[in-house]
Amino acid sequence: MFSELDPLLHSALRLAVMSVLLGVESADFVFLREQTGATAGNLSVQLDKLAKAGYITVEKCFRGKMPRTVCRMTATGRDAFAAYVAALETYIRK
């Protein structure tokens, strides 16, 4: 039997963001944009969706006079990502 895939993580860009964040303690907006190839506007919208779901935290701060947005995966996000991978494996094994 197939497991249901989390629709929030089934988006290519949101899955890419979560995959990047899984391997780092935190990542800033510029790094995530470079790693995913997303436009700034699209990435911003997708980060907001992940934050509203509690999968990531988004901290806005300054480095000197430059604004900086830093993202971190939450425990809820790690659990959701692990569940997504487990659900995906039910499709691969069939």
Image: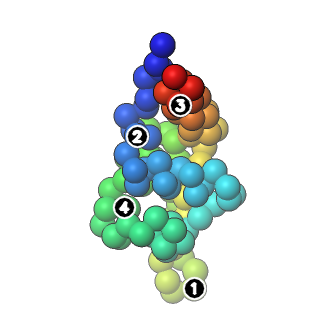
- Say if mark 2 contacts mark 4, CB within 8 Å: no
* Front position in the image: 86 or 18: 86
Q: Residue flagged by tag 1: what amino acid is it?
A: Gly
- Name the front one of labels 3 and 2: 3
Alpha-carbon span between mark 1 and mark 2: 37 Å
**Nearer mark to the viewer, of 2 and 4:** 2
From the viewer's perspective, is the residue at label 1 or at label 2 nearer? 2
Image location (x, y in percent) of residue 64: 57, 85
Residue 19, given in percent of the width and then of the height, sits at: 56, 52
In this view, the residue farthest toward the top is: 1
Mark before the other along the chain sequence, 1 or 3: 1
- Which numbered disc flags the more N-terminal residue, 3 or 2? 2
Residue depicted at 36% across the width and 61% down the height: 44
Q: Is residue 19 above or below residue 83?
A: below
State left or right for residue 67 relative to residue 26: left
Q: Residue at x 37, y 45 (%)?
A: 11
In the displayed structure, 75 sits above or below 73; it is above
Numbered badge on residue 64 = 1
Provide the residue designation for mark 3: 92
Disc 3 marks a residue whose amino acid type is Ile
Dot 4 corresponds to which residue? 44
Within 10 Å of the Cα at label 2, are there few (<14), some (14-19), or many (20+) other Cα atoms? few
